[in-house]
Amino acid sequence: MSSSVSPAPSSHLHNPELRRPLLMRMLLASMIILVLAQGLNAVLMLAAQRNASLQTLATAIRISGHEQVFHIENAMRLGKPLTQMHGLDATLAGLRGSLPFVTAVAVSDAGGTLLQQDGGGLTDGLLATTLAEHQGAALLQRRTDAGQLYLLPIHGQGRQLSGFLVFLLPDSAVTASLQDSRAQTLQSLASSSALGLLLLFAATLLLQRCPERLYRRALFIAPFAAVLIAQAVFSWHHVAAFRASYLTGVSSNVQRASDSLGREFERLLALGVGLERFHGLDAPFQRMLDDIPELASVALLDAQQQPLFRHVRSGSTPTDATGAPILTPLRTGAGDAAKTVGVLSASLSADALSRGIGRRVFDALTVALTSAIFVGELLILLAALMHRHQQAARQPASGRPTARPLLARTAAFTLLFAWALPLAIVPLHMASLLPAGGPVPADLLKALPVSAEMLFALLATLFAGRWADQRGWHWPFLAGTLICAAGGLLAALTASAGAFIVARALVGLGYGLAWMGIQSHVYAASSPRTQMHAIASLVAGIFAGHLCGSATGGMLAEQFGNPSVFLLSALLGLLPLLFAIVFMREHFRTPPPATPSAGSGGLRELLADRGYLALLALCVVPFSIVQVGLLYYALPVHLGAQGASPADTGRILMIYGLSVIYLGPLLGRWLGRFRQRQRFIVLAGLLGGGGLAALYLDAGLWGMLLAVFLLGVASSFGGPAQSSFALQLPAVQRAGKNRAMAIQRTADKLGQLLGPLLMGGLFALLGSQAGLSLAGLLYMLCAVAFWLLTRDAQHHTVVKP
């Protein structure tokens, strides 16, 4: 980051009095960055806390609900049909009493028609929409406008589905359960932010007396360290509070389940059935283990706490238990005559608790990492702006402003951050707009907004390059950001599935225009020597925005609902437009007239050029096939079949993004010194393909992680090398850089479209492990073929100083 800032004159660095104005600007900017970073971190942490609280409440609903379903099913086995069962009103009232955080409890038939309801907010239409997604799950959960809806199936004779026990959990109940944790989070936020401010002030004072040889680097390392320390302290407090809250929630739910089962046992004891005569305890004990994954075993003890019956989770042993068991006494009699005749003992699993806490620690680390990426991008912007200020001070008034590709990185980051906010919820929001029981399969309709968005992004790239060549890069970029924001606003306001598809198509059109515009600016603003570094930096900003935006949007959707995320995406979508007008306006220039050969004849020459065609067919398309096929199809499908969680898949995907964000600019700067770009294109193919081919030996979690990391490293320099190689071809120079890059972008989209289809075909023919390995070998062969076809291309490239 510091390497992007040219040193100021020596007298300026050495004199503390001359340093003070620069340091004051740095302090103010760093304080703004600290506030923004801490705010983002707090929002993400609160969303994570909300998810954890929601899981705890859902477990409580599952425990109490399964108890009542058991009683209802027993009554049905005795010949009482669900539609004529008496006492349901008292049962539902008792459930609401034991679960005060739910606003409605109901029983419906198998079609979703309400038979009995205690409370309000449930309708037949709401249940019918939810039941369309029921696939025999033990607990169906769905978010609605009224809150979280939970359905537990009720089976009658022959295990035939007869109805559902339904719970409605309002959002206000989840918010109320977070009051204490919110207060702790805000308190730790305030203390860690105060620490960050103190560190920034201390860094400013020390930098005034910093030796000249260290000043330039310390000027940007110091605020970065101060902000990260504040973030680390806040994250540590959050993880500690998270752990305590998790253990409390687990213990509370175990006690709830033990009390429920204990009441059943006490009813049997009151009928004169002794503990030694209890039979068939496997079923209720297994139900407890199913409801609470953190349980290791459940045991029935006599009055002297000697075991009468113990049920251990499959694959576990009694030694897996941790801490003191949770004991529930079983009593007979009432008042002073009551006596304890037995004990129900529930032991927690050390491994399950470690996994549960570990998942939450990883969630917190993911949030902290997302926030750290956000901080890094803001500090890179600060470096670019201070660099700009120093250059302006040394540049004559009549001089032409120097292009700064780092500003393009920030423009790309803000564009992708806004665009990626609703990325994870588009199919889910489409599902909420679909009418129940339509003639077209719901899975197909849910994919239409994404398909429309990708299609219009592809169409935009076909003419955006030509537009940038004729009018300048700023026209497609500014128009694209406005169209993208308008599409986001329409998506937030519409309640129609058709209008939502149109809205996402507009977003895709705007995104394609803006992306090609900012890419054209980088091509024009960098020399052949700096092209690889500039392109790698742009791609890094894109991936940083994508990572931060998608992570933030998913958590905000849980907190505030889907429409709010679409609206925020529309508002933030104007940021890149404002940024370009304020900081990049001096580069709004019409390019020089194209050469006569840049018309249709130049395009024909381009499409007949051996080097350009080899690049598209053997590098761009194969890489896109492997990239999308591995990351967005093979990775979730293959790891999901092995039992890995979606969170594990998401963290592995972050490895790819981090490789591109932080290795790309470094490798691009170093590799940009070499003229023969095709060597690095081939190396990227061998490296990325080799990672996939190695999966033939180990296709487990660690093998996939290595393959994704190697593909990320290959992408970090392979993509910039591809663009830089193409830009140096004489046919590209004559046809127009932006037009050639638009065609290359179209080939990239074509590969992304084919990736999941071809990878799915290989999986079907050979299996996932062999299919991935074969895809890697084919990618490596394509890279070798490209090298054989373009070995003499370096003699025909245009290289400018």
Image: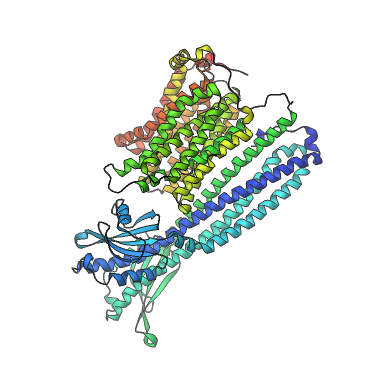
| 439 lies above or below 394 | below
Coordinates of residue 166 in the picture (x, y in percent): 33, 61
On screen, residue 434 above or below 94: above
Asked if residue 735 shows in the view, the reply is: yes
**Residue 453 placement (x, y as % from top left):** 42, 36
- As rendered, which of 488 and 99 lies closer to the eye? 488
Q: Judge by depth and name the residue closer to the eye, 549 or 439.
A: 439
Direction from residue 250 to residue 672 in the image, left or right? right
Q: Quadrant of the C terminus?
A: top right
Question: Percent x, y for residue 299?
Answer: 36, 70
Q: Nearer the viewer, residue 531 or 469?
A: 469
Is 128 placed above or below 456 here? below
Which residue is at the front of the view, 787 or 89? Answer: 89
Residue 215, position as x, y percentages in the image:
74, 39
Q: Residue at 39% x, 41% y: name it.
A: 499
Q: Does any portion of residue 682 appear in the rendered image? A: no
Please give left or right for residue 564 compared with residue 575 in the image: left
